[in-house]
Image: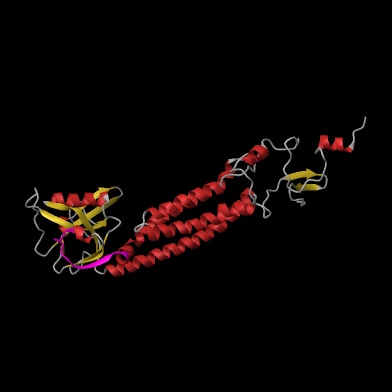
Amino acid sequence: MSRSLSEECGVARRVDCNPAPRGAVFGAGDPFALPNAGAASNHPLMKPRNANQELFFAAYLPFFLFILIVASFTLALHVMPVLPWMVVAVSADILAVGNWPTRGRGHLGKVSALDWLPFGMAFLTLGCAVVLGICNASVVEPWIAASKFTEHSGVLPSDSGVAYADAGILHFAEGTQLDVESAAGFAAWPNVYCAAPIFDKGGPPSTASSDAGKALVSFWAIGRNCCNSRGGFACGDVSDPSVSSGLHAIAQQGDPMYIAAVRMAAAANDMVPAPDPVLVLWEKNPQARADRAWWLSTCILVVACLLAIALCVVAQYVLRRLLGFAPTGRLALPLAGPSGTQHFGTGNPA
């Protein structure tokens, strides 16, 4: 007994045998449907996106955020420390959702390790942006101190350091001296953190505390990898005896490594460090140092932008070639037929 055309089509392909639009998803009862295809498409992170959207989240957006994060760390870390980390948190959330694998490109649509490549590339870019941003923030620090904080002149080292908490540039009174032989270096591999006391012309004052007779020191010149364990301080412009100015080391203020160096120098030379010592970068021309820091930081930021553009182009190439992102937004699945290889969902011959 022969079957009708509708019955034959129902067994072989679809119940209604009506032409389906290109790219249509097979029905749940279709023998050609992929396992769990309907369940995967209902997951909020597994809804299909076209190739343009995937390239945007995997190639374009990460490198735009790369520039934004580097710039936010460079300009805001010393003034608004929370802001760069907020930018990082929001960026991580956007990249995580945007690059979560929507559906597998491997056998039977299963998600493979290769499908996590856009996710991994995006977060590698994010991590590199944070590292470069923090490094560039340390480069631009002298300019931030000189331009965003107060410049003080005629500063007496015997004054309380608390009175100069807002200092950016410090010009000490005539006769101020830096005691390089009373310096100490705190070794914390791979660096040595150095500190040397700054005195008035008449020498350090004595305290009126229980440490009577010991010198109270509020201002300390600091540096890194430029001194011995005891003495030999050679940080900044210390070789010029006429120097009596410096930049307030705002980023290092309160740094436990430098505070340890201050305490070591004080203990070794019968001194008492002030409760809140002011840490200074010893410079003959603080403003010139700040200007050089600004130009260097700007060059680094420009190079970072150019690098981001280049890596964006490379990322597009890798994603198109390795993952097969098609311009139409659908992955080409080869199906053999009598007239040659066909691409499901496109209708175009290979």
Rendered residue at 13%/55% (across/down): 216
Q: How many marks?
A: 0
Check the picture and name the quadrant holding the N terminus.
top right
Asked whether residue 136 appears in the rendered view, the answer is: no
Asked if residue 181 lies left or right of residue 120, the reply is left
Q: Nearer the viewer, residue 124 or 23?
A: 23
Is 42 drawn above or below residue 143 in the view shown? Answer: above
* Residue 189 % position (x, y): 29, 47
Rendered residue at 12%/63% (across/down): 200
Q: How is the image coloured?
A: secondary structure
Asked whether residue 261 appears in the rendered view, the answer is: yes
Rendered residue at 24%/64% (across/down): 246
Is 150 drawn above or below residue 131 in the view shown? Answer: below
User: In the rendered structure, does residue 99 fall within the stretch colored magenta?
Assistant: no
Q: Quadrant of residue 35?
A: top right
User: In the rendered structure, does residue 156 fall within the stretch colored magenta?
Assistant: yes
Asked if residue 207 lies left or right of residue 309, the reply is left
Q: Quadrant of residue 143?
A: bottom left
* Residue 81 % position (x, y): 36, 54
Residue placed furthest toward the right: 1
Asked if residue 239 lies left or right of residue 149, the reply is left
Residue placed furthest toward the top: 1
Look at the image and give the residue range highlighted in magenta.
148-160
* Residue 175 % position (x, y): 13, 68
Q: Quadrant of residue 115?
A: top right
* Residue 244 % position (x, y): 19, 67
